[in-house]
Image (cartoon, rainbow, N blue to C red):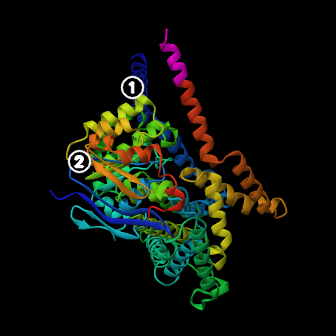
Amino acid sequence: MTPLLELRGLTRAYGSLRAVDGVDLSVLPGERHALIGPNGAGKSTLFATVAGTLPATGGSVLFGGDDITALPEPERARRGLLRTYQHASLFLNCSVLDNVALAVQRVHRVAHRFDRAARRFRRTEAEARRHLESVGLTGRAGDRAAALSHGERRQLEVAMVLAAQPALVMFDEPTAGMSAAETERFADLVERLPDSLTLLIVEHDLDVVFRLAGRVTVLHLGRVLASGSPEQIRADGEVQRAYLGSARTDDLFTGDSR
Amino acid sequence: MKATYETATSAADRTEAVDDSRPRRIARKALVAVPVLVLLAAAPLVLGVYPVSTMTRILAFAVLVLSVDLLTGVTGLPTLGQAAYFGAGAYTAALVGIHLTSDAAVQALAGLAAGLITAALTGWVAVRARGIVFLMLTLAIGESVHQVADTWPAVGAGNGLAGMPPISLFGGPPLTAAGFVYWWVLAVAVIVFAAVALVVRSPYGRTLRGIRDNEPRLRALGYRPALARYGVFCLAGAVAGTGGALWAAHARFVSPGDLAFEVAALALLSVVIGGAGSLWGPCLGAALVLLVRDNLSASIGGHGPLVLGLVFVAVVFLLPRGLAGLTAGLTAGLTAGLRRRHRKERIP
């Protein structure tokens, strides 16, 4: 099976600091792939580089077999490569419904129509409400997004991304700052997503990772440290050392490992 | 278990509130809009020539202010260049009036086209920038067009364009009475207002608000916002051009002063005073600004700009969301109060 997303030696450098350093990674269609690693491992930079928010300084990104390294961010999103943000990035002065509808109306190709009021585009409105319902925000459709709590904002973020008809969703620390109940709700939501949807999840909560992911890749200092099934990763000695920080934390400052 | 139950009911409560508030909101809007329109239409029957002509100017200026609001309030692009497109529309309408026809509808359409074309030609430079750079680019465009109007002999240069005959409608006799001109200007202004309101409520308007709130996020959702920004710039140019044509229909004289920096600045000031993003708020702002500049100023020894400055400072400190924010706060308070009472009644 050809991987849906394939990274070949992907590199993103800030001057001499290589935040993402020659990462090879493949994600198969329908896979639930988790990306873990200690703080500063380069997970968020990797996400931004794959999504096209940051240009890669080396290597290539293949999506569905096509090289998309040179494509701008909107083009990647149109191909179905969507991401969420570590800090919810919403349209705060718009209504909650508008936030989701913005994603839906682009997919329905009505984003530039002004011949009638938005609510008369019934299919778009219904679809947006359906996505709000799936994350449990129906009751807040008319409120401003700025009025939402932290957990609700994360839920809205998920609804927006799912409404954009993704083939692959990259979740950047989706449960950060969520209460235990909200985390549970998020995990439930992810488990209920259709199998055809491919997920790449950066997550600190290892319980969530081992519950959701079929495959785990560990990133450390911008490089892939290990990749395998959750059981293999749990048993991996090097991963434990990276997380416990016994021997190799100096690398952060000296860069000797390169 | 109890907690989940409670959130479920409160969510249901809120859905209910959202659902039944829509018709009520429409009814409330109609309750305000209909009397306002009737009063505006009845004005020439009860008022003298001078107040009616003042109101005509306010309406034409309000159309310019609407175009500034479309860019600044809805899309988040503060502009000082809309007077250029207003002027392009006014000059074109005056030229059409002098050389071609006195038909007001033709003049208005010509003004609209002139604003649209001028904006399309100059806008692609401006829409590449955002924030303060966009503001400076629009200022540069405005000043350049002003310079052209001030020096080009074909449009009268510094003397302006005089000698425009009175407008006529649908082949009728020339409309010399101020009341008829007022009704024409009012009709077009209402149509433009409705059109802008439709754009704001349409999916495109939603896209524009998305640009205002968070353009990088919009890009991550697969939008190409540059095109939408250029589109709204052209649209705002067309609206401003129509306003210019209305201005010319009333004044029958256009001079470079009509597209000077002061006009652009007053239009932006009207939007700030009225409340950026609301449509009727900036129209009220337009009325306030023109009344202070043209009417109050004369009776206080020409200190109108000082009053405008004080009003501006007061609005920024006391009403950060403008006149529109004032009533939004009032109605929100009212509904909250009603809902509270409603709950209290239900509890026993």
Q: Nearer the viewer, mark 2 or mark 1?
A: 2
Q: Please, what is the three-letter code of the amino acid marked with disc 1?
A: Ala
Q: Position of residue A47 (x, y in %)?
A: 39, 56
Where in the figure is residue A36, as x and y percent of width and height?
38, 47
Q: Position of residue A123 (x, y in %)?
A: 26, 46
Secondary structure under tag 1 reads: helix
In the picture of the structure, the residue carrying the numbered disc 2 is: A31
Q: Which residues are magenta?
A: B339-348
Above-or-below relation of B162 to B76: below
Chain for mark 2? A
| Quadrant hosting residue B57 | bottom right
Front residue of A95 and A137 = A137
Is residue A117 something one can see in this rendering?
no
According to the picture, the residue beneath numbered tag 1 turns out to be: B12
Q: Are marks 2 and 1 on the same chain?
A: no
- The reply to whether residue B233 is in sight is yes
Q: Are marks 2 and 1 in contact (CB under 8 Å)?
A: no
Residue A154 or A8: which is nearer the viewer?
A8
Which of these two is toward me, A155 or A70? A70
Name the chain under label 1: B
Q: Position of residue B35 (x, y in %)?
A: 53, 43
Residue A177 within the magenta-colored segment of the rendering: no
Which residue ends up furthest to the right in the rendered image? Answer: B301
What quarter of the picture does the C terminus of chain A occupy?
bottom left
